[in-house]
Image: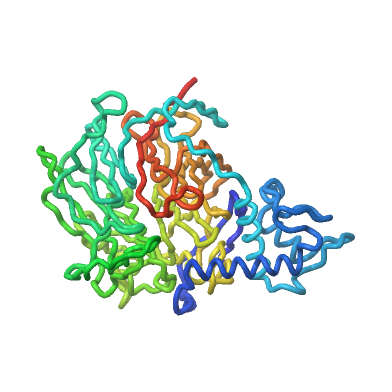
Amino acid sequence: MIRRLGLAAGLALGAGMLAAQAPAPPAANAGFGGGRELQRLTGERFTDNCSGCHGAPGSAGRAPNLFDPRLLGSRSDEELYRTIAKGVAGAEMPAFEEILPAEQIWQMIAWLRLEAESKQPRPQFVADPAGAVIATEQQRFRIDVVAEGLDTPWGLAFLPDGRLLVTERPGRLRLIDHAAQDRRRLRPEAVRNTPVVWARQDAGLMDVAIDPDYARTGWIYLSLVELRPGYQLPPAPVLKPGERPPNHPSMTVIVRGRINARGEWVDAQTLFRAPLDRYTPSGVHYGSRLAFDPQGRLLFTVGERGDMKNAQDLATSLGKLHRINRDGSIPADNPFVNRPGAVPSILSWGHRNPQGLAFDAAGRLWESEHGPSGGDEINLIQPGGNYGWGVVSMGIQPGISAREHPGMIGPVAYYTPTIAPSGIALYRGRRYPAWTGNLFVTALAGQHLRRLVLDGDRITHQEVLFKAYGRVRAITTGPDGLLYVLLQRPTGEGTGQPLSASTPGLVIRLVPLP
């Protein structure tokens, strides 16, 4: 059995093996409303069984306050489970394994962490971080604003000449000129004639990557969301206040092209497009991160589009990490290339909404993905591995009660409450010597940049570097050895903006200080 262990707020250990045949996941995803209902039921169980001694959120009891972030932060999920399940000898704490099933105890632990986080004040948003000096455990740095005026920036990649490409989710590819001064580096004109995207809710123009042999080929790779080819949009409905326009069938697509001397997208090629019957009107979980492996093959992620049974179905590209050659052909050593009915580009499966990919110095592939209510994951990818979504989760999800299952690979780290991990990058430069070989994770809901210390296939320490500048989407190392980060103004609860709203963004870099 694969172990799924760890600290919900920090470290988790995992072992891995190739995927075994998985049980069938629930027939359909219970959705976000179902998640809220499950949390409500879990809260009622706490009230019925625990509040008499421990109090309720915002009120004290005669036993320790289980909503205290300091208490929760000092104990792993496994320690909390043992205490709840086995009880405390000589105290009033009974053994709840005689009262509650194991899955309900795990759900209660996740609910406690979610409730405790919800009572904490939100970080005060600083719209302009320019000049801020931050002292971390091993490095002081100053924040420089490289460019502003971006609209929901999603991905970034450096060209060999030092120019920076940034995607804007509404559908524009922007160039940031290294030669200009201060905040005037963003060219006013977007690259012309880029592919038309479907920009609705989470969809739009997503990631960008540069060919490993760009000096010779000139290829630039994009992940984007398109409306199903041939689909005719119906007349736009008249919406009542607060209503959203309907979604239409869409899907993640991978393309490549070149930018000519006139700033135009040319020589366009489509490298990956799913069968048209797989396009779905769901507006969430597109995945879309791009990366190249050490052999120069292209990796990309596709989310399960809000229907978790897709993640356990090898006949669909949804909920998977894929590997193709740079021309779109299929590598001969892909794990499912000879399995009848399986999508041959699949490298790993059982994913929810993976949005981060990074190779470490030893060639290990790290991946980040969004969980449901809690349970965000950092994974080590094995070819052919099944990462469990649809059957197991560290978060709260209707239809899932297990945290482990034979043949399924557990996360190396997971997070409850959610941080919504997006882009990740391994630092290989010399400008921050103490950070060389560390993994950096950007967090959307957590609105922070997180540093992870790696020791082989383990995460031994974590540190939040800053938490004040809005949603942190992506990170990369520039040719100058500095870390460059995409920020976006906050959205979601308490901001007056829907979670998936388009808001202004900027590029910053971290300048080391003595």
Image height of 152 relative to 145, above or below: below
Q: Is any atom of residue 347 visible in this view?
A: no
Residue pictured at 18% horizontal, 70% vertical: 232
Compared across the picture, whether 383 is left or right of 6 comes to: left
Residue 474 percent coordinates (x, y): 38, 44
Residue sitting at x 62%, y 67%: 40
What residue do we see at 46% from left, 38% from top? 469
Residue 464 vs 348, above or below: the answer is above
- Residue 194 image point, x, y percent: 17, 50
Q: Position of residue 6 (x, y in %)?
A: 61, 55
Q: Nearer the viewer, residue 66 or 386?
A: 66
Instruction: State the count of labels.
Output: 0
| Outermost residue, top side | 514
301 displayed left or right of 117: left
Residue 342 vs residue 469, the one in the foreground? 469
Q: From the viewer's perspective, is 99 left or right of 155?
A: right
Q: Quadrant of the N terminus?
A: bottom right
Colour logic: rainbow
Q: Which residue occupies 73% across, 58% down?
A: 56
Q: Is residue 197 above or below residue 312?
A: above
Residue 88 visible: yes
**Which sits in the foreground, 416 or 86?**
416
